Image (cartoon, rainbow, N blue to C red):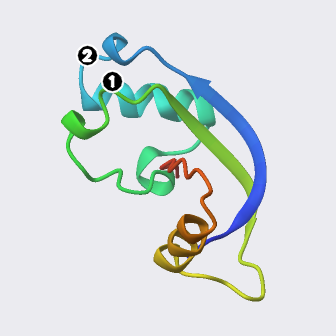
Amino acid sequence: MVAVGSLKAVWPVEPEEFDGMTDLMDRFARYFRCRWEDAVVGGDRPFSEHRYWDAYLAVAGLAAPENTLLLPELLRSLSVRGEDVHQTIFG
């Protein structure tokens, strides 16, 4: 599903700086003042899938527009129009 919102904060990180998943989760909580488990989509995946991320984004006021598209429909529509698509995972 596609939703819209306002960018609230960006936490740029150096992937090598974390000692492991617990360190990443603790530092995330300190930066964003919210628990990793409550915020990160796919946060239950292993550290190996998070360790090379360059940044985390916080979005405020998420809302689904009236004519909500599922992501595959949106990607197909953009592809047909020749648009560049940059997929960003955030929670």
Residue found 51% across the figure and 74% down from its top: 76
Q: Which residue is mark 1?
A: 23
**Above or below, 2 relative to 7:** below
The CA span between labels 1 and 2 is 6 Å
Q: Classify residue 12 by image quadrant.
A: top right
Q: Is residue 27 left or right of residue 62?
A: left
Front one among 38 and 69: 69
Residue found 51% across the figure and 35% down from its top: 29
Q: Classify residue 58 by image quadrant.
A: top right
Residue found 76% across the figure and 59% down from its top: 5
Q: Which residue is mark 2?
A: 19
Front one among 83 and 4: 83
Q: Position of residue 4 (x, y in %)?
A: 73, 64
**Above or below, 46 relative to 51:** below
Asked if the residues shown at circle 1 and circle 2 are in contact, with their CB atoms under 8 angstroms apart, the answer is yes
Amino acid, disc 1: Asp
Residue found 40% across the figure and 30% down from its top: 53
Q: Position of residue 55 (x, y in %)?
A: 52, 29
Q: Is residue 3 left or right of residue 13?
A: right
Amino acid, disc 2: Asp
**Residue neighbourhood size for the residue with mark 1, other residues' Cα within 10 Å, grouped as few (<14), some (14–19), many (≥20):** few
